Amino acid sequence: MELVKEFNTPMGTSTKLDMDENGKNIDIIKYQGMIGSPLYLTTSIPNIMFSVCLYARFQACPKESHVGVVKCIFLYLHGTINLGLWYHEAGYISYLDADFMRYKVDRKKN
């Protein structure tokens, strides 16, 4: 993976996901495996929480378009290997800035 282009964000700003009913089906087990690893990492890398949980919504009927955006998380993680939270005895403070307003799946509007 040394020659891949790394992403600066776990999810593109123009990414709009929906059920993609006309898309090509893929193996459910493969998709669930791809989502499982980043779900585990959300405990130490909270800034991927929103995008991972959004992609996890499509585990019942994943399409090729969903796999393409999940790969963006892996490219982001490859570029940010040294970032994360370390838990100390005194506790921790984390901040997260996520925009939940523009996704068709949530049906929320500005």
Image (cartoon, grey):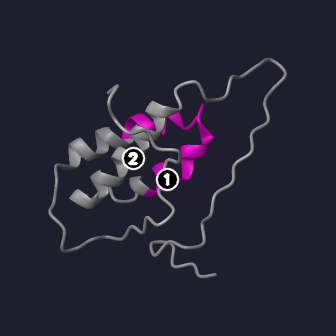
What's drawn in magenta, residue-wise? 36-54
The quadrant holding residue 93 is top right
Kind of element beneath mark 1 = helix
The spot of residue 62 in percent (x, y) is 25, 58
- Type of residue at label 1? Ser
Residue drawn at the location 48% of the way across and 53% of the way down: 11
The residue at which mark 2 appears reads as 72
Would you place residue 3 above or below residue 89 in this image? Answer: below
Residue drawn at the location 51% of the way across and 62% of the way down: 13
The residue at which mark 1 appears reads as 51
Instruction: Kindly report which numbered mark, 1 or 2, lies closer to the viewer in this rendering.
Output: 2
Magenta stretch: dominant SS?
A: helix
Measured Cα–Cα span from mark 1 to mark 2: 10 Å
Would you place residue 105 above or below residue 45 in this image? Answer: below
Quadrant, the N terminus: top left
The spot of residue 32 in percent (x, y) is 30, 44
- Type of residue at label 2? Cys
The reply to whether callout 1 and callout 2 are in contact (CB within 8 Å) is yes
47 magenta-colored = yes
Q: Which residue lies furthest to the top in this view?
A: 89
Residue drawn at the location 69% of the way across and 49% of the way down: 96
Q: In this view, does 85 lie to the left or right of 105?
A: right
Q: Residue furthest right?
A: 90
- Mark 1 vs mark 2: which is more N-terminal? 1
Quadrant, the C terminus: bottom right
